[in-house]
Every structure is written in structure tokens, then in C-alpha cells.
Image (cartoon, rainbow, N blue to C red):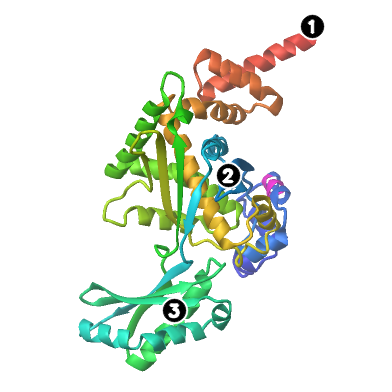
Amino acid sequence: MGTAKKFYQLSWANRLTTLIDQGIITPAQAKILKQQANNQLLGDQQIENYLTDYHLPQGVAWHYLIDGQQYLAPMVTEEPSVIAASSHGAGLIAQSGGFKTKIGPHILWGQIILEQITNQQQLKQQLLTQKPQLLAVADQAHPSLKKRGGGTRLLRVRSLNDQLLSIDLGIDTQAAMGANMVNSMLEAVAKYLRQQLGSQVLMSILSNLADECLATATCQLPVELLTKGSFSGRQTAKKIALAAHVAQIDPYRAATHNKGIMNGVDAVTIAMGNDWRAIESAAHAYAARDGQYRGLSHWSLSADQQFLQGELTLPLPVGFVGGSIKIVPLVQLNQQLAQIKEVSDLEKLLVCVGLAQNLAALLALVTEGIQRGHMQLQLRSTALAAGAKITEVAEVVQQLQAQGQTDLTSAQLILQKIRKNGDHNDRI
């Protein structure tokens, strides 16, 4: 860009003009960016080098009966069948009395890493002796959090190797995701350690392994509800329990098992304006907490084999306030749609969505197979990718199913025939 302003310093209109002038995009493509930019002022506030808004479909899953209260689950996802599966799983559980939840404290960990340590044992003892002062320094860095009932709760010191120590602060962030406040509090303590103890601080940063911010959902279904086709309810329940066990002993299966859980969790997290990457990171790290990566959910039959019992625990460092949550109108609408009134409501909804999503996936896997449930919605996406108009999609899907070939090329050929026949009929 030569002597011109840096890209982030340009106005939004000038950024688009610059991309055109440098031959990176065409004027027609710039028009697409302009059409999709719903709120340029808001976009400029949220990110650097803003160009446009990237849209994903939002829908809503029904039937979430949680601790005796009905919830809706707004979901943002591009994957076919996620919302349908979510509603199906939640509906089965609702027929059995719904979900029961247990929500723990909303505590996030932050780390201060010390390096170049000559006597670890002596330093550990010194740090633990000064625990009250360290917690006070952290709280003084964010006094408004303390006033709202939050603040520091825990301190521990861990040896990482011969030369590295981690001082872990557990901080109750109340209704906020809390990354910025935690980092500010950590930096205040790091400064204190440098000045008062002469410690060498390598870095201070929030940890996304939020294993002190856990939410658990449980459910119990009569096996009769799981009768499907030629499978009795008890047979299906046994297969679901066994499939869940496979995810406990095989990390290859566990990865896909957990991805299915996070299909729903991520979709709601995005709709609620939260950092879905942090939730993914926390969940997958938690899945490997004993040294092997395992499935996050557990399913088993009751002693009398009359009920299928499910349980899911997730670390959920989500927020109800702060960040983009209060400045994006759609997020506030989604909170109202879901009837979320505080951060614990959101934690409840997320962990229940994960368990419902998991039930629907396992039920499909052990009976009709996963593809049959996915296929109808997937074929619609294939038809659209082939260039079908909305009015043509149903016929393309019908012919793809009839001929048993469901690839993009087949959809394109079918679409060509439909349009050719349509032209012929018009001439007649």
C-alpha cells in the first residue's frame, strides 16, 4: 500500500476500494461484501480490518425440559440435521421427566508461570505463605468484581519441571466470560512477584481448562421409548450403552463421539455471543483429564434394565454479560428466546443440549445408521450446491433418492434435465 495508511486505518469504504484497486477482488465481488455488511459500525467495533458479515443459519430446537422448566435452544449452525437431532433427543428425554442438572461455581483458572528457579521448595513455601497478599493484590486489580460477589477463590502452586512453577489463581467471574478481567488480575500479581520477591515471570494468562466451572446434566428414559423398527427398546438401550463405552476405551471413536456433543453445544454458544473456541478447548482438554482422551458422556442401563441413564459433565466458562453479548442485538434476542436470565441458565441449557445431541446420534448409529437421518437434509444442500433454485430443490432431492446416486455431479445432471424438460413444456 506504499505510503498510504495501513489497512486497518482506512475507512470501511476505502478498504473495499483498496482491494478492488489492487486487483484482489472485482467490483462485483465488492458489491457482495457491501450487501452482506449489515452493521458496518458494529463490525468495526468488534474486529480489525472489518469487511462484511458472514452469515450462518440460525434455528431453534424445542422440547428442552430442564429442572422442570421449559427452554428453547437457539442454534447457529451450517450442518444439516443438527437442530433436528437436538429436538429429537430433547423430546425423548422430555417424555421421561426431562433433564436434571447440577451447576458448580463459576471459577476460571489463570496462570502465572515463573522461570529460572533455583530452589523450588523454598519458593513454593514462600508463595503459599503469602497467599493472602497475592489474592488481595489480584482483587484490588478488579475491585468491581469483588463488589459483585466475585473475585479470587483459590490459589495453588504446581511444579511443571525443574525450572518452571505455575501459580494458579481460581477466580469467580460471576456472569462474565471473564478473560480480560482474569488477565488483568494476573498481570497485577505478576508485577507484585517481580517487585516484592524478585521472581522471573515468563508469562501470565488465563487457562481455558475450566475444570472448576463444571455443569452436569443427567436423564433417565424408560427403555420402551427407544423401540425402533425391529429393535426392542431394551436392545436399543444396551447398544447405546455399549456404543458409549467404546468412546471410553478408544480415542478414535471418542473424538467423533465428542464432536457430536459439541455440534449442539457450539451452535448454542455462538447464538449466545460466547467464545465457542474456548468452550471447545475446555471440553476436549477435560476429555483427556486422566491421560487418555475419552468420551465426555456416559450411558448405562439401570440395575433392573428398565431405564437408560445418561450423564454429561462439561466445563462451561460462558458469560451472560460482557464482550459482544450486550452490543449485538441478536444475542440479546436469543437470550429472551431461550428464556435465559442468568449465566447458570445458559450453563444448564448448554450441557443439556450436549446430552440430547449425543442421545440422538447414538440412537441413530445403533439402529438405522447415521446416514439415513442425515441424508434428507444433506441432499437439500447438495441440490443447492448444484445451483438449484428453492423451487427446484424438492424435485432434485426426489430424483437423487430414486436413482441412489447422491453426489454433486448427479445433482447437476438432474438439474439440467429438469430445466430442459421445463423449457420443452413451456414451448408446448
Q: Secondary structure at mark 1?
A: loop
Neighbor class of circle 2 (other Cα within 10 Å; few <14, some 14-19, many 20+) is many
The percent position of residue 391, horizontal first and vertical second, equals 71, 24
Residue of label 3: 186
Among the two numbered marks 1 and 3 on one chain, the one whose residue lies closer to the N terminus: 3
Q: Quadrant of residue 108?
A: bottom left
Q: Quadrant of residue 341?
A: bottom right
241 versus 174 height, above or below = above
Q: Residue furthest bottom?
A: 196
Q: Secondary structure at mark 3?
A: helix
Q: CA distance from mark 1 to mark 2?
A: 53 Å
Neighbor class of circle 3 (other Cα within 10 Å; few <14, some 14-19, many 20+) is many
- What kind of residue is marked 2? Tyr
Q: Is residue 30 magenta?
A: yes
Residue closest to the eye, 189 or 201: 189
Residue occupying the point 68% across, 63% down:
327
Q: Which mark is residue 69?
A: none
Q: Quadrant of residue 58?
A: top right
Task: Determine if residue 23 is in view.
Answer: yes
Q: Is residue 374 left or right of residue 1?
A: left
Which tag is nearer the camera, tag 1 or tag 3? 3
Residue of label 2: 64
Residue occupying the point 55% across, 49% down:
66
The percent position of residue 16, horizontal first and vertical second, equals 68, 56
Contact, CB < 8 Å: mark 1 with mark 2? no
**Start and end of the magenta stretch?**
29-33
Residue occupying the point 58% across, 16% down:
399
Residue of label 1: 428
Which tag is nearer the camera, tag 3 or tag 2? 2
Q: Is residue 36 left or right of residue 244?
A: right
Among the two numbered marks 3 and 2 on one chain, the one whose residue lies closer to the N terminus: 2
Q: Main secondary structure of the magenta part?
A: helix
